[in-house]
Image: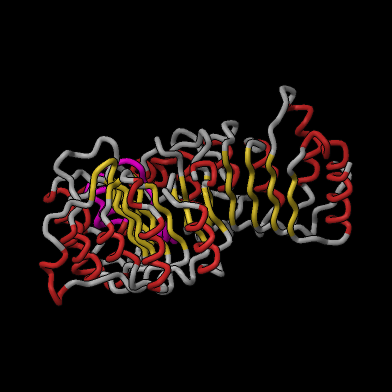
């Protein structure tokens, strides 16, 4: 009953944000509500078996959301809902769909404003215009990673939403297929393509062909946030990264990338990078390593780096040389605000190079293999250095901290508001 009262009060008092979290309790009242003042809607719920019956009140409510700009759904979205949204919400800018297997390409077609035929994509490749009557033309962000959508639906969104900046598709869908649907597979014609898209984020879980990546970069000159899966072979990875040299990339996430190739790229574009993630996946080539020398090079050539993520898949930071051998040339990170370390072994010296000179560190996420490194004396040293004074969020998995160590952590980090996971402490 409280949830029904909450929804009634929010809509009657013209609230701009609405959260629906208990669908069974609110179903009877949804059809009676007017959501014309709502700009942000978030729905979190699990549905029963009779989805047709349960969706009717919600669908009626959706037809009133004429000023909606943001929609977030978890386990409560389908193609019919997106059809209603596409016709009702001309100001919609972002859509996040999570764990909704009832959403597929048809739902994305509705958002784009056009249901394609078998010939539509070939017509687009030939330069034909698509007659669009509805659709969400102000969409900037669409996240459908956890749906059954595919390349065809994503292609229509990209083609028909002129200001779309971020399009996140399921991991088993290759973004390269989206672009070949729109521009064909004849690489000789790619240099003739004049189409430009507004994409600023490229997130792809699969390896991309060099020619396809070149096409993506050519048609999306505003890309700033790029996630690539590489091959692990220096020559191939360098050729892949060479396509990015003309972009002003600020966020770079590379998976299975040869460090020689990555450092070659960073030497030319590292001054623009603010966030860098290096990941070695479970199927990474055995030849891939990350050394202390690599860390020193990254610190030197990425002076603006604020966010650094290192995930090495059960490998250490290789001590190819002692830090003392760097002498006066030894450098430390100084501008990091976020640091994530997962699946690796590190020494006290490694951690010191990473954080001891960072007075602006806000978030520290450490899930390492050598748990004995995370004990009181190590913590006390970093607390005394002042590098944790601005810390707000701390994730340590199974640290060997005592009760006294925890008390000092809380005392010396006055801005700390998130600590965990406590179940492992």
Q: Quadrant of residue 55?
A: top right
Name the quarter where the N terminus is drawn: top right
In the image, is residue 119 part of the stretch drawn in magenta?
A: no
**Residue 65 in the image: x percent, y percent?**
75, 52
The answer to whether one can see residue 299 in this image is yes
The structure residue drawn at horizontal position 28% and vertical position 46%, both measured from the top left corner, is: 312
The structure residue drawn at horizontal position 24% and vertical position 44%, both measured from the top left corner, is: 315
The structure residue drawn at horizontal position 80% and vertical position 33%, both measured from the top left corner, is: 24
268 to 404, vertically: above or below: below
**Residue 401 in the image: x percent, y percent?**
45, 52
**Residue 31 in the image: x percent, y percent?**
85, 41
Is 207 on the left or on the right of 154, as rendered?
left
Residue at the extreme front: 404
For the magenta stretch, what is the residue range?
A: 189-216
Tally the numbered discs.
0
Is 357 on the left or on the right of 396, as rendered?
left
In the image, is residue 202 part of the stretch drawn in magenta?
A: yes
The answer to whether one can see residue 161 in this image is no
Q: Nearer the viewer, residue 422 or 372?
A: 372
**Residue 196 in the image: x percent, y percent?**
39, 60
Q: Nearer the viewer, residue 397 or 148?
A: 397
Q: Nearer the viewer, residue 313 or 13?
A: 313
Is 133 on the left or on the right of 20, as rendered?
left
């Amino acid at each position: 009953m409280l949830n029904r009262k909450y929804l009634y009060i929010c809509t009657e008092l013209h609230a701009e944000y609405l959260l629906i979290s208990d669908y069974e309790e609110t179903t009877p009242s949804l059809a009676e509500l007017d959501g014309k003042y709502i700009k942000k809607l978030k729905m979190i719920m699990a549905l029963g078996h009779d989805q047709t019956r349960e969706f009717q009140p919600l669908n009626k409510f959706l037809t009133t959301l004429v000023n909606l700009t943001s929609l977030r759904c978890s386990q409560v979205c389908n193609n019919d809902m997106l059809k209603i949204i596409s016709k009702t919400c001309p100001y919609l800018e972002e859509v996040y769909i999570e764990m909704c297997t009832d959403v597929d390409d048809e739902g994305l077609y509705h958002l784009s404003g056009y249901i394609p035929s078998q010939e539509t994509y070939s017509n687009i490749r030939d330069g034909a215009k698509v007659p669009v009557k509805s659709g969400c033309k102000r969409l900037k962000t669409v996240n459908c990673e956890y749906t059954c959508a595919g390349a065809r639906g994503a292609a229509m969104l990209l083609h028909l939403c002129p200001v779309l900046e971020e399009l996140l598709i399921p991991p088993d869908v290759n973004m390269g297929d989206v672009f070949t649907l729109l521009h064909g597979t004849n690489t000789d014609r790619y240099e003739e393509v004049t189409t430009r898209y507004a994409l600023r984020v490229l997130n792809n879980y699969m390896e991309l062909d060099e020619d396809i990546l070149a096409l993506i970069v050519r048609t999306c000159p505003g890309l700033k946030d790029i996630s690539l899966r590489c091959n692990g072979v220096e020559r191939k990875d360098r050729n892949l990264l060479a396509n990015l040299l003309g972009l002003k990339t600020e966020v770079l996430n590379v998976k299975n990338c040869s460090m020689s190739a990555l450092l070659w790229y960073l030497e030319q574009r590292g001054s623009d990078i603010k966030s860098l993630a290096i990941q070695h996946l479970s199927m990474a080539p055995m030849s891939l390593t990350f050394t202390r020398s690599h860390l020193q090079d990254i610190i030197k050539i990425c002076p603006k780096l604020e966010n650094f993520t290192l995930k090495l898949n059960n490998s250490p930071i290789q001590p190819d040389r002692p830090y003392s051998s760097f002498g006066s040339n030894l450098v430390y990170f100084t501008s990091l605000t976020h640091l994530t370390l997962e699946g690796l072994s590190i020494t006290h010296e490694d951690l010191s190079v990473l954080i001891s000179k960072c007075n602006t560190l806000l978030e520290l996420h450490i899930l390492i293999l050598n748990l004995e490194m995370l004990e009181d004396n190590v913590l006390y040293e970093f607390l005394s250095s002042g590098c944790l004074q601005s810390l707000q969020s701390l994730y340590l998995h199974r640290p060997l901290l005592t009760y006294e160590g925890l008390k000092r952590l809380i005392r010396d980090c006055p801005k700390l508001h998130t600590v965990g996971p406590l179940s492992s402490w």
